[in-house]
């Protein structure tokens, strides 16, 4: 296993200049990335795009990946491993809507927040350079217009593990969560600690499966098949078993099996067909409704309640 | 929650308030609804508490229309699932006894009390119709008073009993109008789950107390001591330490004084024994104050503890609902040693195998087997194999008995991998290009990548351990033959046998218990439950995570690139192992009739002036383990064009990999070196003979010239050319010199055979020493063909004559002797 590159001020400056830890959407680049030299002794690490983007996302635990998929399903845009810079800096949504940038609060920087809270910031291993903390997921809630209110931080931790079930006052983990909370509070950002164990397992498996079919570009040839199908059968597809949808797409609309499967999954992901993804999807039965309500409920939670 | 949309509630339902301004401000149970009177009776379900006593307040009567309106505005909501009842309220009499029965009791107090309470109100609530009257405040008072009068004749207790009946009725209605609702709140009594404040030392007396010594009874644990025990348990009792050591350290840290010794050094002196916790106290309170730090976990490493203790939600295939949703890949070395395809006595050692497995049914969709160590390149080949149709590949391997439709191409949404071969930028990038993400399991946690790991074991058993040169995956024992000594198989044979085993693995009937769906849709239709059938079934019913991409696209993105050159004979690949030196892989070339390729060949043939050696070089996609084809990508329109192999060696495309071809070339170079050497030597010998002939001719000419008186002029030399030619022709037969039999002169006079040894050429040959004869050989080689044949023939004949003469002499000598 190769060695971690040495952290220097020059390196940090170069990386930030190259855009690591900044940008939005497709152009965002994670500050921490999965490399050959940073395997985890504890977690499953995931390198994979999260819809609707094609860029590689770097998740340092399976929970992060699953929650990112879930939040992406409800319509949030994900920026993973988002840096909380030590020095005073702009709001995470600075630049998202330039005409409102002046209304966004500025952060004092993590160094000041930690020193006020009496929490040791820490340094990069083997150096005296202050460590740059990152929050696991920085969400942009697209259904909220205000850039200030549409930002949410989610810290993903194994809440069922003993480390978080029984908080040790000397443990660094909970201390870091407190620092993250203070940082979010400083910027008036909603902050959560999340874990996949809080959700039924089915939801992640099924969303992971459907995520591949989340995006169908407007100019894609299959878009026409979908529109034709919805125009003809849209009012009654809720009553069809899922296998029947496949059959009709193949028989009546001359779709190939792969095309039909993609379109079915696309309808399920985007809830064109209301389907509760927290329950097992059974192909020989009609979709169980409830997905839209579930999505609305999660949206409500993400924005910190009504 | 239920969106009631303003419907009229049903008695028994629970209404929850969502606003402080609503007509109901706390959670209530609906007791009675009267639409005609526009009234609704509700009762709060949450008990009040006063002086450690729980009680319920009475029913309230509200305007029904207002409640319905607020339900419509979602200010009030009806709880679909009701509220959770107290466990004691739902417990049977036996359950209550089991929980609360004390020694000496026949019936537990809660059971008895519940029965008594119910008996008090039973006449009031037994009748369903009469019960409704109790919701009218006026009637209620009258009925309660009447019941109180029935229960006691003592006027002084009437008020008290009436109050009790009222309270019981409230509890009864709030709890859902069941007998269980009257169960007392015994579960809240006493010090359940509370730590008793210790005042005396617990447990048996210590030795000092037994000896009647006062004030030495032992240590009484206070809250601070318990916390210290917990801290010490968590932080001092760690791996490679013991409880005793941790206890002593705690004593030193928290139960000691620091004293200065006479030499000025500091010493920690422990408190007396009765002023510090005992080991039993330390263990008890240390564990109790440190949940998650149980003693059995202390001696494991963090890694091992994670492996056995951390709750993982199921296995690697959990939450997999579709084919291709989660794959698994890993590499291993087959437990088998290989030999060279060129010469089977040459050992080439072990190989590497990469598997790509679908996590749903452990279907092996592709693999790589070759000499190259796991890398991005070999991983790409494995995934390319998984993605592409196998018909041609099976033909190439000669496995025509296998059905290609059972080799189902699969593209993966994400793939589990360990932190070895797939964890590199090249692999991440190339797999990302085909839309496959990577999930790296934790370090040293291959158990989390079980689909490929179990498939490795399967293939070891099915292939590796059944062939020559296997190590059986075990270390060599003394006296055993080494695997490489027993090696007999080539790589291509191993690929063929692995393909056979994978096919068997995928098409073997599984001994699984079929689900209802499988029974309905497969078993009853007579379809066997094999991995291939199940995978195909899932795909057909729409459980496919990602669509396949085109094979050309897959090749473009995953196939390794090699350099080659367009020549007039086809594409020749350049050897990758020679650095900057340009050397073709000679035995093979690739051709195609595609117009673009034909144009390239033509250009390479005719436009050779003023171009550098690498002018017609290009990049080609190829599978190093399938030399029968390469692909060229047109940079303009991106078309991928297939070129097929052409070679004189018919077996080569089917038996060799590129490595083998290059290895063959290296071996051939040695052969060619000797062949070239031999050729040069032959030419050198021939030219030496020519030189001798020239010299002899020149000498003879000079001798003839000296016989003349005067050196002839050049014109005189040429003058009689025709005449000379005619004379010479007369001496020849058919224009060729006449070949005379041995022993005759060139002029035609035949020499008589004699018994005496002749001094003529035959004698010269026999009498010459062998060394000299050998020296003459080059001269023979240097003569013209006819001349040398003549000389050879005459020499042979003279030797035959000599032997005949010798035999005659022996015969005559022998006769004289007789």
Image (tube, rainbow, N blue to C red):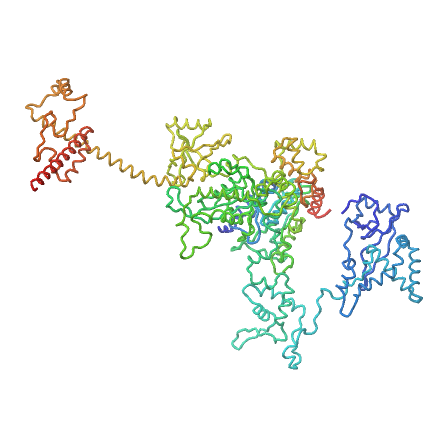
Of all residues shown, which one is farthest toward the bottom?
B212
Q: Tell whether B651 sits left or right of B280.
A: left
Identify the image quadrant of the C terminus of chain B: top left
Q: Position of residue B50 (x, y in %)?
A: 81, 62
Looking at the rendering, which quadrant does residue A256 occupy?
top right
Rendered position, A226 above or below A118: above
Q: Which of the two residues, B773 or A85, is positioned nearer the viewer here?
A: B773
How many labels sit on residues?
Answer: 0
Q: Position of residue B197 (x, y in %)?
A: 71, 69
Q: Which of the two residues, A190 or B605, is positioned nearer the viewer here?
A: B605
Let me know if residue A21 appears in the view. no
Let me know if residue B724 appears in the view. yes
Q: Position of residue B551 (x, y in %)?
A: 53, 35
Q: Tell whether B145 sits left or right of A126.
A: right
Q: Position of residue B18 (x, y in %)?
A: 78, 49
Rendered position, B524 above or below A224: below
Q: Tell whether B672 sits left or right of B104.
A: left
Of all residues shown, which one is farthest toward the left?
B709
Q: Tell whether B440 sits left or right of B100.
A: left
Q: Which of the two residues, B219 or B388, is positioned nearer the viewer here?
A: B388
């Amino acid at each position: 296993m190769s060695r971690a590159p040495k952290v220097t001020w020059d390196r940090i400056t170069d990386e930030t200049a190259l855009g690591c830890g900044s940008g939005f959407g497709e152009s965002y680049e994670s500050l921490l990335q999965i490399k050959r030299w940073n395997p985890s002794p504890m977690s499953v690490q995931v390198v994979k795009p999260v819809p609707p983007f094609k860029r590689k996302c770097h998740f340092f635990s399976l929970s992060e990946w699953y929650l990112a998929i879930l939040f992406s399903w409800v319509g949030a845009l994900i920026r993973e491993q988002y840096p909380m810079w030590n020095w005073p800096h702009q709001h995470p949504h600075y630049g998202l809507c330039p005409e409102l940038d002046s209304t966004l609060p500025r952060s004092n920087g993590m160094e000041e927040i930690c020193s006020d809270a009496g929490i040791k910031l820490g340094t990069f291993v083997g150096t005296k350079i202050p460590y740059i903390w990152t929050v696991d997921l920085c969400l942009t809630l697209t259904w909220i217009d205000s850039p200030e209110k549409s930002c949410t931080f989610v810290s993903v931790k194994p809440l069922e593990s003993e480390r978080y079930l029984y908080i040790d006052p000397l443990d660094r983990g909970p201390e870091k969560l407190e620092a993250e909370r203070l940082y979010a509070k400083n910027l008036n950002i909603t902050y959560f600690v999340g874990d996949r164990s809080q959700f039924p397992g089915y939801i992640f498996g099924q969303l992971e499966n459907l995520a591949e079919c989340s995006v169908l570009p407007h100019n894609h040839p299959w878009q026409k098949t979908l529109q034709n199908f919805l125009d003809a059968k849209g009012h009654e597809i809720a009553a069809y078993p899922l296998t029947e949808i496949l059959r009709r797409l193949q028989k009546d609309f001359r779709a190939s099996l792969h095309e039909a499967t993609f379109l079915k999954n696309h309808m399920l992901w985007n809830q064109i067909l209301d389907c509760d993804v927290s329950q097992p999807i059974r192909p020989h039965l009609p979709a169980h409704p409830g997905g839209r309500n579930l999505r609305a409920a999660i949206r409500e939670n993400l924005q910190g309640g009504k | 929650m239920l969106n009631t949309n303003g419907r009229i509630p049903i008695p028994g339902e629970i209404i929850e308030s969502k606003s402080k301004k609503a007509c109901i401000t706390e959670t209530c149970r609906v007791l009675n609804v009267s639409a005609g009177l526009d009234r609704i009776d509700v009762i709060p379900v949450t008990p009040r508490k006063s002086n450690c006593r729980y009680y319920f307040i009475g029913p309230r009567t509200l305007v029904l229309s207002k409640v319905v309106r607020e339900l419509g505005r979602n200010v009030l909501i009806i709880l679909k699932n009701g509220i959770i009842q107290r466990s004691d309220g739902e417990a049977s009499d036996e359950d209550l006894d089991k929980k609360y029965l004390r020694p000496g009791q026949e019936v537990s107090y809660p059971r008895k009390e519940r029965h008594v309470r119910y008996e008090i109100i039973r006449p009031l609530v037994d009748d369903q119709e009469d019960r409704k009257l109790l919701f009218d405040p006026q009637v209620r008072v009258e009925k309660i008073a009447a019941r109180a009068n029935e229960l006691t004749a003592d006027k002084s207790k009437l008020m008290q009993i009436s109050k009790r009946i009222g309270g019981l009725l409230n509890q009864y209605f709030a709890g859902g109008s069941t007998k269980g609702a009257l169960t007392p709140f015994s579960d809240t009594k006493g010090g359940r789950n509370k730590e008793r404040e210790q005042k005396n030392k617990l447990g048996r007396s210590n030795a000092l107390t037994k000896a009647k010594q006062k004030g030495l009874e032992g240590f009484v644990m206070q809250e601070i001591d318990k916390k210290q025990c917990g801290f010490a348990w968590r932080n001092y009792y760690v791996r490679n330490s013991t409880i005793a050591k941790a206890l002593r350290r705690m004593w030193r840290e928290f139960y000691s004084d620091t004293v200065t010794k006479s030499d000025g050094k500091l010493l920690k002196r422990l408190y007396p024994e009765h002023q510090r916790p005992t080991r039993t106290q330390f263990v008890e309170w240390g564990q109790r104050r440190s949940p998650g730090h149980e003693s059995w976990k202390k001696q494991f490493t963090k890694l091992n503890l994670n492996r056995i203790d951390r709750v993982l939600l199921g296995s690697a295939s959990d939450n997999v609902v579709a084919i291709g949703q989660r794959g698994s890949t890993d590499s291993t070395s087959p437990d088998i040693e290989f030999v060279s395809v060129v010469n089977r006595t040459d050992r080439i050692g072990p190989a590497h195998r990469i598997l790509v497995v679908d996590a749903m049914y452990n279907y092996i969709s592709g693999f790589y087997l070759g000499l190259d160590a796991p890398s991005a390149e070999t991983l790409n080949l494995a995934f390319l194999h998984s993605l592409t149709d196998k018909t041609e590949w099976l033909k190439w391997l000669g496995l025509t008995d296998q059905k290609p439709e059972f080799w189902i191409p699969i593209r993966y949404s994400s793939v589990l991998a360990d932190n070895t071969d797939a964890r590199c930028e090249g692999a991440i990038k190339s797999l990302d290009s085909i839309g496959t993400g990577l999930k790296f399991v934790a370090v040293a946690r291959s158990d989390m990548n079980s689909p490929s790991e179990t498939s490795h074991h399967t293939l070891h058993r099915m292939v590796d351990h059944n062939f020559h040169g296997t190590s059986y995956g075990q270390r060599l024992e003394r006296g055993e033959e080494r695997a490489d000594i027993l090696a007999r198989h080539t790589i291509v044979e191993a690929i063929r046998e692995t393909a056979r085993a994978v096919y068997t693995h995928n098409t073997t009937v599984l001994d699984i218990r079929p689900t209802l769906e499988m029974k309905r849709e497969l078993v009853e239709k007579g379809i066997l439950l094999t991995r291939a059938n199940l995978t195909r079934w899932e795909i057909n019913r729409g459980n496919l995570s990602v669509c396949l991409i085109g094979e050309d696209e897959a090749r473009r993105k995953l196939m390794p690139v090699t350099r080659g050159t367009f020549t007039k004979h086809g594409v020749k690949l350049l050897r990758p192992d020679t650095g900057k030196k340009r050397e073709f892989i000679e035995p093979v070339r690739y051709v195609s009739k595609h117009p673009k390729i034909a144009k390239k060949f033509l250009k390479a043939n005719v436009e050779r002036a003023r171009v550098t050696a690498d002018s017609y070089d290009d990049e080609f996609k190829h599978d190093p383990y399938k030399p029968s084809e390469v692909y060229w990508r047109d940079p303009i329109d991106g078309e991928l064009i297939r070129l097929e192999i052409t070679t004189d060696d018919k077996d080569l495309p089917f038996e060799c990999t590129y490595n083998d071809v290059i290895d063959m070339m290296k071996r051939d170079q040695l052969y060619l070196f000797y062949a070239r050497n031999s050729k040069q030597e032959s030419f050198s010998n021939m030219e030496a003979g020519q030189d001798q002939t020239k010299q002899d001719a020149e000498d003879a000419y000079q001798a003839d010239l000296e016989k003349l008186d005067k050196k002839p002029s050049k014109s005189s030399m040429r003058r009689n050319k025709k005449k000379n030619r005619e004379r010479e022709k007369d001496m020849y037969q058919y224009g060729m010199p006449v070949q005379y039999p041995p022993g005759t002169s060139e002029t035609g006079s035949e020499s008589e055979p004699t018994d005496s040894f002749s001094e003529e050429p035959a004698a010269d040959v026999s009498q010459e020493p062998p060394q000299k004869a050998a020296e003459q050989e080059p001269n023979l080689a240097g003569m013209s063909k006819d001349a040398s044949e003549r000389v050879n023939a005459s020499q042979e004949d003279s030797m035959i004559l000599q032997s005949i003469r010798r035999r005659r002499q022996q015969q005559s000598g022998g006769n004289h002797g007789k």
